[in-house]
Amino acid sequence: MKIDVLSLFPEAFTSFLATSMVARALQKGAIEVALDDIRDYSTNKHRKVDDYPFGGFAGMVATPQPLWDAIKAKLQDGPASVIYFTPQGRRLNQKILLDYATESRIILICGHYKEIDQRIRRLAVSDEISLGDFVLSGGELAAQVFIDGLARLQDGVLSDIASAQSDSFYHQMLGFPCYTRPEEFMGQRVPDVLREGNHGKIEQWANAQASFLTKTRRPDLL
Ligand SMILES: C[S@@+](CC[C@H](N)C(=O)[O-])C[C@H]1O[C@@H](n2cnc3c(N)ncnc32)[C@H](O)[C@@H]1O
């Protein structure tokens, strides 16, 4: 999967791309990430990429020209979904990640300032995604969350894909509690069923735990 990121702060991705599963996905060639500085596409002699909003509102607006040219340049490599991260988008969930995980190319737009010019959203964006009901200063963290979520779903990235398949939301359920050594910690023992080696019973236990957690914490998922 090829992921193009358009951002005013590409340096915000440096340590993110060098860490954990995302670094592994890159190293295995499961994902390819190209970072582009939106400012590089500005035709303004001072590389300006923002201006005052019409209507006299507070804040600045990202001008359409650099974004338009950047998106056009990226689309020359072939068709791709163009995703803009915004609190006004549909709320990100595992289903959205699973849907995008099989695409071969996506372009991610990280907003900044008060907003990007609405005409870019109307003319060039195919999907708008939100991390949740709060406002961040820029779309970089949203893009990183999205890339991480996609990377772990690519073939060969997790050493055991069954682990991702039993994580929360993969089957519209929350995950189950996990234990490791020691068998007793601060007076708390690991449930007997997990130590007895009966795989049928262990699976039943995990399903029952996941159902209970989902019913009590997230009944909306059921
Ligand atoms: C200050 S915010 C703009 C908020 C916008 N004026 C609004 O009211 O919806 C600047 C940028 O941060 C990103 N951003 C902020 N909150 C976000 C969220 N919850 N999900 C995704 N992106 C977000 C977007 O790219 C947005 O363009």
Image (spheres, rainbow, N blue to C red):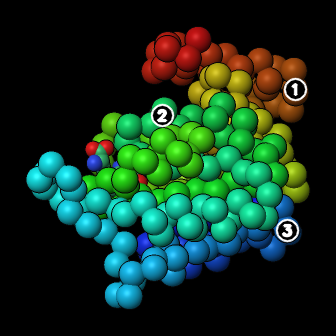
Number of numbered discs visible in the structure rendering: 3
Judged from the image, the secondary structure of the residue bearing numbered disc 2 is: strand
Q: Verify CB contact (< 8 Å) between mark 3 and mark 1.
A: no
Can you tell me whether the CB of the residue at mark 2 lies under 8 Å from the nearest atom of ligand 1? no
Report the Cα–Cα distance between label 3 and label 2.
Answer: 28 Å
The picture places residue 216, in percent across and down from the top left corner, at 47, 15
Q: Measured along the vertical axis of the image, is residue 17 above or below residue 89?
A: below
Residue at (79%, 26%) from the top-left corner?
A: 202
Judged from the image, the secondary structure of the residue bearing numbered disc 1 is: loop
The picture places residue 162, in percent across and down from the top left corner, at 83, 40
Query: Which of the two residues, 207 or 154, is positioned nearer the viewer here?
Result: 154
Report the Cα–Cα distance between label 2 and label 1.
Answer: 40 Å
The disc labelled 2 sits on which kind of residue? Arg
Q: Is residue 53 left or right of residue 123?
A: left
Q: Which mark is residue 29?
A: 3
Q: Name the residue under label 1.
A: 198
Label 3, residues with CA under 10 Å away: few <14, some 14-19, many ≥20:
some
Q: Quadrant of residue 175?
A: top right
The picture places residue 167, in percent across and down from the top left corner, at 68, 37
Q: Verify CB contact (< 8 Å) between mark 2 and mark 1.
A: no
Query: Which of the two residues, 124 or 20, is positioned nearer the viewer here?
Result: 124
Residue at (56%, 49%) from the top-left corner?
A: 124
The disc labelled 3 sits on which kind of residue? Gly
* Sequence-first disc among 3 and 2: 3
Q: Mark 2 points at which residue?
A: 91
